[in-house]
Image (cartoon, rainbow, N blue to C red):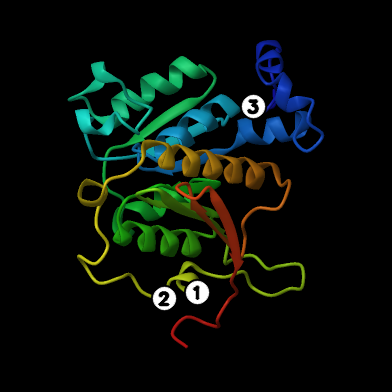
Amino acid sequence: MNDAMLSASELERYARHIVLPEIGGPGQQKLKAARVLVVGAGGIGSPVALYLAAAGIGTLVCADDDVVSLSNLQRQVLHGTENVGETKLESAERAVARINPHVRFEAFAHRITRENGADLVGSCDLVVDGSDNFATRYGMADLCEERKVPLVTAAVQRFSGSLTVLAPHRTDSEGRPLPRYRDLFPEAPPAGTVPSCAEAGILGTTTGVLGTLAASEAVKMICDTGEPLLGRFLMVDLLAMRFETIRYRRMGARGT
């Protein structure tokens, strides 16, 4: 039996997806067969994990090495008051199971690095990065490029955020290689120049909006539908309620 076949209860659960021509039964089967890595079970990773679980992703791999604190709860909706002091992965696993028992949850209780993350990334069909530091963002972009795995990457600060989709191992409609993360951000800003959420603050819904948009891009990539943000950079300003998109392109071979 095909593992991606949908049971009667799954057909009912995903009925509103299946009636969408852009997803349908074949798209829902792709979602069920997919293995997605979510980097971070925090502000961005929370809505990503919740919506991908609800969407019927077959295997959700979550990487995080932190514990739930009271100050997380204003934005990290995977977790509740009763989870304070637990690891975020323990809390996330229960939340995912509560939403959808058909989803297989796998925990990676470490901060991902180039050394420990290559095999994990290579085992997945897509990665969603919701990490809160530049080292991880650049590292994930490099790992995904090396293992030829598409990457949805989101970032937030205060009332604003950004989102793009990377697949530099692919080409566009004219046969040109798609851009890398470093075509958009050649270098990380100097340490200390960008304040953390703890220093600058963060509107809780900012992470919700960006995480939900990231989950949407993940579904589109897996179902091969719509126009994902490949070569496009979305900027969101919730204080002004403004959405802007810029295009960017491949700047040439690495090191040139």
Q: Position of residue 128 (x, y in %)?
A: 47, 47
Name the residue tied to disc 3. 3
Q: Residue furthest front?
A: 240
**Front-most of 102 and 115?**
102
* Residue for point 63% across, 34% down: 31
* Residue for point 69% across, 23% down: 1
The mark lying in front, picked from 3 and 2, is 2
* Residue for point 32% across, 44% down: 202
Q: Are marks 1 and 2 in contact (CB under 8 Å)?
A: yes
Separation (CA) of disc 3 from disc 2: 42 Å
Separation (CA) of disc 1 from disc 2: 6 Å
Q: Is residue 112 left or right of residue 233?
A: left
Q: Position of residue 247 (x, y in %)?
A: 62, 68
Q: Is residue 38 left or right of residue 177?
A: left
Q: Quadrant of residue 11?
A: top right
| Between discs 3 and 2, the one toward the N terminus | 3
Mark 1 lies on a secondary structure that is helix
Name the residue tied to disc 2. 186
Q: Position of residue 215 (x, y in %)?
A: 54, 40
Q: Is residue 2 left or right of residue 201?
A: right
Q: Residue furthest right?
A: 21
